[in-house]
Amino acid sequence: MKELLEKIHAAGLEEIKQVKNLEALKEIEVKYLGRKGELTNILKGLKDLSDEEKRIIGPATNGIKLDLEAKIKDKQSDLEAAEIAKKLAGEFFDITAPGTMTAHEIGHIHPLSRVQQEAENIFSDMGFTVMDGPEVESEYYNFEGLNIPADHPARDMQDTFFLKDKSEQKHGRLVLRTHTSPVQIRTMEKYGAPLRIIVPGRVFRYEATDASHDTTFYQVEGLVIDKNISLADLKGVMAEFLTRLFGKEVKVRFRPGYFPFVEPGLELDFSCLICNEKGCSVCKHTGWVEFMGAGMVHPNVLKAGGIDSTKYQGWAFGFGLTRLVMMRYGINDIRVLQSGDIRFTQQF
Ligand code: PHE
């Protein structure tokens, strides 16, 4: 019996020594120490042995059992450590390696927004306040207040979108503003004189679209009201604005023009930057580029704004921001600006 025990012990130790993985080790444990294991069987059979044999075989079996248990435990932690080391080596993750994903797309500032921001900055530097007004306007602010009564032929100058809302408005029907000029009246009503403002904003005209016309475009309105304001100030402000915007000396000139809300009314041109006034296709060989309408604010308009025209006077202008952007970046179709096509905006 003793010999058998020693053989089991030695075989167990050898098997534990040879074992290569945790699964096989588990099998060895079952084989020697499990409920149907070899040592358990011997312990179960103790009751059939003589007292003397019991006294020797019992403790010897338990001793072997404890020894094998301890050896299995040691082996188990060795194997586990080896397994973790192997896993770590296999799963090595280099956090410094360059990524394989393409970089996230970042947005682009729309050229209209970019030039608008530049214009706002330049005029702010010259002491102008940037104002805002509603895109859905009343006929009063868009026309009457600006000295354009209902039967005035100038209403046809700007084809208007009317809103379907038939309810009687205090200030007439609702329209999509055809220009930023209504904000002149709104600002005069709210703040009085003196004033020095610009109003960048979206305007709408009911007209057929082509490469140079869209139903929606952007304007920048300007209004200065004070004592002793003259058109010489306007000339200086616009020459300074365009020179700063284009980053090179720009000249401006006036031509007579007509708008019901200014008197005298005029058109302002600037010297062609492409050909330096020599004449090219951009300036239609005149050396000058038509830029905006302007003039001294009509007394009726000052009156509508609640300003005393015997004490104050001023000038106003309105230029097309959209056209300015097209000139600046050489864009030859106005429709791409509002197309939402990112292939366009990605270029800026
Ligand atoms: N509102 C005019 C237009 O849209 C421009 C303008 C503004 C002219 C102010 C004179 C003074 O055409």
Image: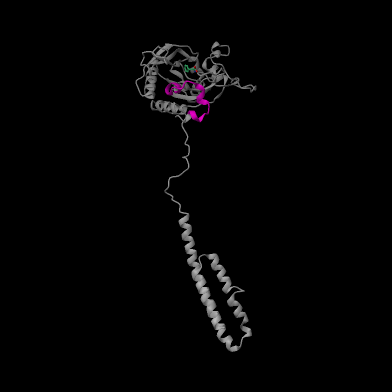
Which range is magenta?
325-344
- Residue 21 x, y percent position in the rendering: 52, 64
Q: Could you tell whether 201 is left or right of 240 in the image? A: right
Q: Is residue 340 magenta?
A: yes
Residue 63 vertical placement versus 94 (above, below): below
- Residue 228 visible somewhere in the drawing: no
Say how many tags the image has: 0
Identify the residue at the far right of this view.
166
> Is 139 or 280 nearer to us in this picture?
280
Rendering coords of residue 6 (x, y %): 53, 80
Residue at image point 55% right, 85% down:
56
Which quadrant is home to the C terminus? top left
The residue nearer to you, when weighing 304 against 2, is 2
Q: Kindly report the secondary structure that dominates the magenta region of the rendered protein.
A: helix
Residue 31: x and y, percent? Answer: 58, 72
Residue 246 visible in the displayed image? yes
Q: Is residue 77 magenta?
A: no
Q: Residue 156 appears in which quarter of the rendering? A: top right
Q: Could you say which is closer to the camera, residue 304 or residue 163?
A: 163
| Residue 308 image point, x, y percent | 47, 18
Residue 8's place in the image compared with 313, above or below, is: below
Q: Quadrant of the N terminus?
A: bottom right
As rendered, which of 318 and 39 lies closer to the eye? 39
Q: How is the image coloured?
A: one colour
In this view, 262 is above or below 68 = above
